[in-house]
Every structure is written in C-alpha cells, then in structure tokens.
Image: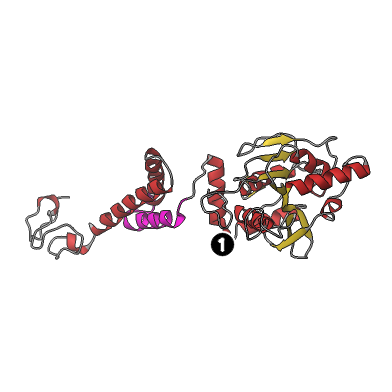
Amino acid sequence: MTAYEPPGAPGAAAPYDAVVLAGGAARRLGGADKPGVRVGGRPLLDRVLAACATATTTVVVAEPRTTVRPVRWAREEPPGGGPLAALDAGLRRTSAEDVVVLSADLPFLDEGTVGRLLDTLRGSDGPRGPGHPEGVLLSDPDGRDQPLVAAYRAGALRRELAALAAAHGGLTGLPLRRLTAALDLTRISDPVASFDCDTWDDIAAARARIREHGHVLDEWISAVKDELGIDLDVDTGVLLDLARDAAHSVARPAAPLTTFLVGYAAARAGGGPEAVAEAARKAGALALRWADEDTPGDTPGVEPGPGSGAEPGSHAPTPSGAEPGSDAAPDA
C-alpha cells in the first residue's frame, strides 16, 4: 500500500491521526452490528480502516473487536452519549495536528479520498499554508454535509468541543451540527465516497455495486489481501497477462497454479512488487517458450519455425522408432 504523500513533499508523508466512530445503535438496521456487516466479503469497519491505514494513530470509538489492523480503542462516557461525546473520547487519544474523522459505515471510502481531504485542509502551500480551513468534509449528491467523512485541525475541534461542553454541562446528546456550525469549513463533493449504509437497502446497493464488472476485480484483490494479511501493491495487469499466457500456451489449469507458484517464489525472494514482477516475467517467458515448442516447425518434415530451437535441416525425433520419412505408424 502506498503511503499518502502531500503535494510538494515527495517521499515525506505528513502525519495525521484518525478517529473512527463505530458505536452507534444502528436503529434503521434493526439494532444489527453495523460495523461488522460485510460488504464485498469485508466488515464495514475494516473497509474504513483500510482507507486510513497511513494514519499515525487510529482510534476506534466502540467496544473492542477483532480488526484487520491494530487500533486504539476508546469509549464515550456514558456509552451511547452521542457523536460529540464519542468524538471527544477518540480525540483525547490522538496527538497529530490534523485528524481524519470517519464513521464506520462507508463502503467506498478509499485512501485517495482521505488524501484529498488532507490536501484541501492543508492548502496548496503545505501543511500550515495561508488560508487553510479548520475542516474539510464531503457532501453527498444532495448537497448535505457529511461531518463524519472529514479532515479537521485537531486544535479547532478541541477548542469547540470544550466550548460546547462548558455551555451545555457536557457533550452527551448534542448533535454534530453544533460543532460544525462553529468551524470554518470547506466542502468537497464526492457522491461515491460519501455513500453510507444506514439501512438494509443501502447495504444491498453497496453489495450490488461491488459486483459490477468495473469494480469486482479490485474489490476481490483488496478483500484477499485483507484476509491474508498482505500489505502489498502489485501490477495486477502483469499477473493477468501471465495467467492468460499460461492458460493459452499450456492448459487452463496452468493459469491459477502458475500464479500461485509466482507468489511463492516472490515470497522466497524477499517479497515486494519487484520480486513479484521478476517471478512473473520468468514464468511468462517460460510459457511463451512452451508454446513455441508446439509450432508446426517442430513436427517431422516441416521447416522449423522461429523460436523452435531446431537447426535448419535437422530432423525431429520420429515417434515410436519409425524410420524418418516412412509411413509406418507406431505399434498399437
């Protein structure tokens, strides 16, 4: 997975923390465990955690559970005290100047969108450039703010949360709009990344979209990497070309078996995209050589074709001891 790098700072990722709110009651899902609902074979919470995988610290505000990557856990007091109380509890366990705040029900959020939020928050002149806002949030297709798909300046959040707690005797039960109304915010429109799953119809729509032709392969590869604990970006086109060549030049079952062996060889060579590419190159070249041996030039009495390896004028072995040029068939 490629680390997020802000513009103008190649090779140096600016730190940020992430707070994921995952403790809601999910009333419109009948009280189901929404963060654990699977979309594309992965729990919604794990999909969100993958989008903020480059955060220095990730805090999930909810009861602890098994996740694909390590996180810190927090809980609002009292439990069920609402989004502002949950945000405050998570924020207390972070230290970066910038913090990404996310809900745990965003099936299409990805690392690129998180980077875009941070870029806009920091401005074009670097992390503390002139005129940068206090927060940047996504808006949905209807223009509604999504304050739980956003990047904020942590200091601004702490300032306003403290002011609200002082004015209301605490944060329990206060809506998010009380916080966002007090901040200088910028909006970004992203109808896909802002899609959240509040109902079973939303879940069904997300599952259907993932299985569309244009998305299914990337979704499957991401799910497999999560399941196997692999954090590796490789050129899937190289592997697909290898599978095609193995299937065409050898036999269809050669495709999955060859790609498995390439992965095994790459792991023995130390892993990494370069090791995968080199193993795929070698296996691909072998598949092409294999196909060359099956050209007409490799049969008796036919001039050898390019790449057959036979010298001009030489004779290929004849089957079952038949004399060259004879019409005798092999013994049955």
Q: Is residue 165 magenta?
A: no
- Splitting the image into 4 quarters, where does residue 138 fall? bottom right
Percent across and percent down for residue 128 are 67, 53
Amino acid type at mark 1: Gly
Seen from the viewer's position, the closer of residues 231 and 118 is: 118
Q: Residue visible at 78% across and 65% down?
A: 142
Q: Which residues are magenta?
A: 234-254
Q: Residue visible at 84% across and 39% down?
A: 80
Q: Residue visible at 37% across and 42% down?
A: 265
SS for dot 1: helix
Seen from the viewer's position, the closer of residues 228 and 59 is: 59
> What kind of secondary structure does the magenta stretch mostly adopt?
helix
Percent across and percent down for residue 313 are 8, 62
Residue 22 shows up from this direction: yes
Percent across and percent down for residue 2 are 53, 50
The residue pinned by badge 1 equals 214
**In the image, farthest residue toward the front:** 130
Residue 41 shows up from this direction: no
272 relative position to 249: left or right? right
Seen from the viewer's position, the closer of residues 198 and 121 is: 121
Vertical comparison of 332 with 72: above or below? below
